[in-house]
Image: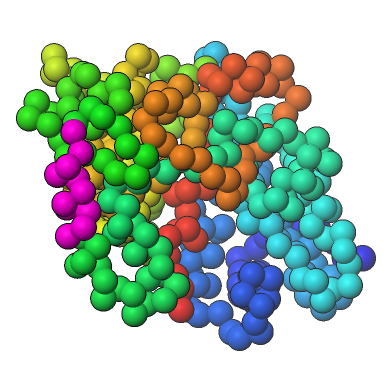
Amino acid sequence: MGQIRPLTASDIPSVAMLFQRAFRQTDAASSTAFVNCLHGLYIDQPLVHDSLPSLVHEGRTGISGFISRHRLPMQIGGRAVDAALLGTIMADNRAGHSLIGPKLLKAALAGPQDFSFADTASDISRALGQRLGCTPLPAHSLNWLRIIRPTQWLADQVTQRFSPFGLLAPVAGAVDALLRRRIRPNRPRWFAYAPLGAHGTSGVAGAGKSATVRDIDADGFAVLFAEFSARFALRPRWRSQDISALARQAMEKRLFGTPCFGAVTDQRGRTIGCFLYHLKKGSTARVLQALAAPGSEGVVLDALIAHAADHGAAAIIGRTEAWLMQAMLGRRIAFTNTASSMIHSRDAAILDAIASGDVLLNGLVGEQWSPMIGNRFE
């Protein structure tokens, strides 16, 4: 039947091969870059902790299952708590043991953590988690999408599957430029987005308050992250240097484009929010993290979308969070579900905070910083 034990550094090559078989359906050897990535992510990463190691299932033929865990130092109401961030779970179907996945997840949930959290659960993992007592978080499980340049966005989607269509990009850009000139500011459209008006207001509903965005670096973002995360009952227990290190690691997503850090300032010169997204001109900008002062959620969201639009994004996509959902109403934002967030805990205070939406989860407080997302190792 095999045994479940903590991951060790010597297991990494076997875990890489398991990944090849489970997700890429090949027995080809893993690249050195991919093995190095896994070692850095599951052995050397600062969020790796002896109390919450990743786990492997070892059978007679070697490593046949894996689940990743990282320790998230959190706090609620001034009380320190620890979360286990659960990520990749995989099993070798050829091992002849159909319960490897459930056994790994059950073992991961049974650790010393105050709660367990996952934000990249597939439909299968979510269903398995629910059978083991996990609770899905619908408000944290949607991707939000705002289309800015519809023709370019559609052409980019097709080009990702049929590369010759990339030759149509200049034509798509010209069509969208004409369309955007015809849109009146402050009149929202589902499939287009007006350029900024003369006074810095965007063409999205509710953007009556003007805001400006200034570029910042990872260290500046870390300071603002610490400031604006203080509004939540359940939030990370991180130092500024910890946030900065995570943000720098999250910057390296070559498939997503250039990282953009921004600080949002209101009419009075007060900083009211910040964000981090990746930009690839003519393609979809991907938001990793946004934060706002209470009452400024809509203004920050408008500023984020306008910033991406001004820098050439065809659309912008991000992950929903409970505190941001109300601000998305009326802004012509669409929603899809490709992966789910779920939580497991018996702590009443934690469950109450999650039920009320007074939590900071997803983004950096999740798996989106991981180099496994947004990179290719070939």
Give the residues in magenta: 174-184
Look at the image and tell me whether residue 214 can be seen: no
In which quadrant of the rendered view does residue 94 lie?
A: bottom right
Does residue 347 appear to the left or right of 223 in the view shown?
A: right
The quadrant of the picture occupied by the N terminus is bottom right
- Outermost residue, right side: 1
Q: Position of residue 80 (x, y in %)?
A: 57, 23
Look at the image and tell me whether residue 98 can be seen: yes
Q: Which colour scheme appears in the figure?
A: rainbow
Q: Position of residue 274 (x, y in %)?
A: 29, 32
Which residue is located at x 66 percent, y 52 percent? 122
Which residue is located at x 54 percent, y 13 percent? 77
Does residue 307 appear to the left or right of 377 in the view shown?
A: left
Is residue 354 located in the magenta-colored stretch of the structure?
A: no
- Outermost residue, bottom side: 28
Depicted 204 relative to depicted 76: above or below: below
Type of secondary structure dominating the magenta stretch: helix
Numbered label tally: 0
- Which residue is nearer to you in this view: 25 or 228? 25
Which residue is located at x 48 percent, y 66 percent? 37
Does residue 236 appear to the left or right of 60 in the view shown?
A: left
Which residue is located at x 34 percent, y 45 percent? 191
Q: Position of residue 176 (x, y in %)?
A: 22, 54
- Which residue is nearer to you in this view: 338 or 32? 338
Depicted 171 relative to depicted 176: above or below: below
Q: Position of residue 237 (x, y in %)?
A: 48, 28
Does residue 284 appear to the left or right of 74 in the view shown?
A: left
- Which residue is nearer to you in this view: 60 or 49? 60
